[in-house]
Amino acid sequence: MKRKILTLVGLLFALMLLSYPLPVLAEGMEPNPLSWDFGDVEVGSSSTTILTLTSTGMTPVVIDSVVLENNATGSFAVLNDARLVNCDPRLVNSDGEPVFGVPPPSVTLFPLGCSLEFVLEFTPSGLGLHTADLRIRSTAHDPYDYFLVPLQGVGIPEVLDPGELMTNLMRFFNVSVADGALIGHGPGHSADHRLKAFGNMLKASSDLIEAGAYDLACTQLRDALNRTDGAHPPPDLVAGAAGEELADMIVAVMDGLGCP
């Protein structure tokens, strides 16, 4: 009789497990990608990618936390537009709130075959390599179980559009002339004519860049640069305290154009 009672109790317990599947730990989850390199991103810009977390076990999965760790520079973020895919849209978190359109909840339960998408963002706070770890953890059972998704990206200098660089150069030229920091090279009226000629060279370069004639713009800018370097020939057209910075800005425009 005792053996029959134990058998009956065991059968009832098995039926309960089938009727109320228990959440499993992280071995029932599969993140994709397993790691992510955002590559080179200009400082001041951002790059995003989607991380998909899929339930692969035979029972529902409980996610207790999705957090960034070792994010020393603060350059990585999990955006608050996590969404469920391939599963019942009526699914809610532990607070009874829909998961759609909210940050990753503190506890998320989703069944076999269902996926949860997170948008990861990299906004480099400075130049160089940045790293962090995305920890996806379940604490439903002891000990903790988790996935760790390594993230990295490199901050690079902002590359301005050649047209914008040329606009900045023209503005600097006009301000420097008005302030007296840039003057025509040579005596008397010839200096005024040379200063005007140099301004016309810059204006022609700007027009060529706007027209997309980069090769011709490179030729014009190289000629302008040769007229500011203090070497002869050809003779310089401009002089003054702003001359060195002016030359640097011309070089920057040429680099932006990819001039040889």
Image (tube, rainbow, N blue to C red):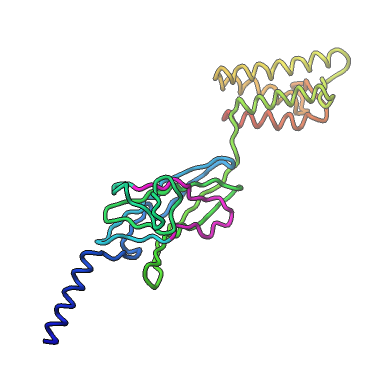
Q: Quadrant of the C terminus?
A: top right
Q: Where is residue 65 in the image (x, y as percent from the top left)?
A: 44, 60
**Residue at x 34%, y 57% (from the top left corner):** 109
Instruction: Name the residue nearer the viewer: 142 or 17.
Output: 17
Whether 224 is among the magenta residues is: no
Q: Where is residue 197 in the image (x, y as percent from the top left)?
A: 74, 15
> Which segment is the magenta one?
65-84
**Residue at x 52%, y 51% (from the top left corner):** 76
Q: Where is residue 226 in the image (x, y as percent from the top left)?
A: 71, 25
Q: Where is residue 228 in the image (x, y as percent from the top left)?
A: 75, 26
Instruction: Name the residue nearer the viewer: 86 or 9.
Output: 9
**Residue at x 32%, y 48% (from the top left corner):** 90
* 240 with respect to 213 (left or right): right
Q: Residue furthest bottom?
A: 2
Whether 73 is among the magenta residues is: yes
Residue 247, quarter of the rendered image: top right
**Residue at x 59%, y 42% (from the top left corner):** 43
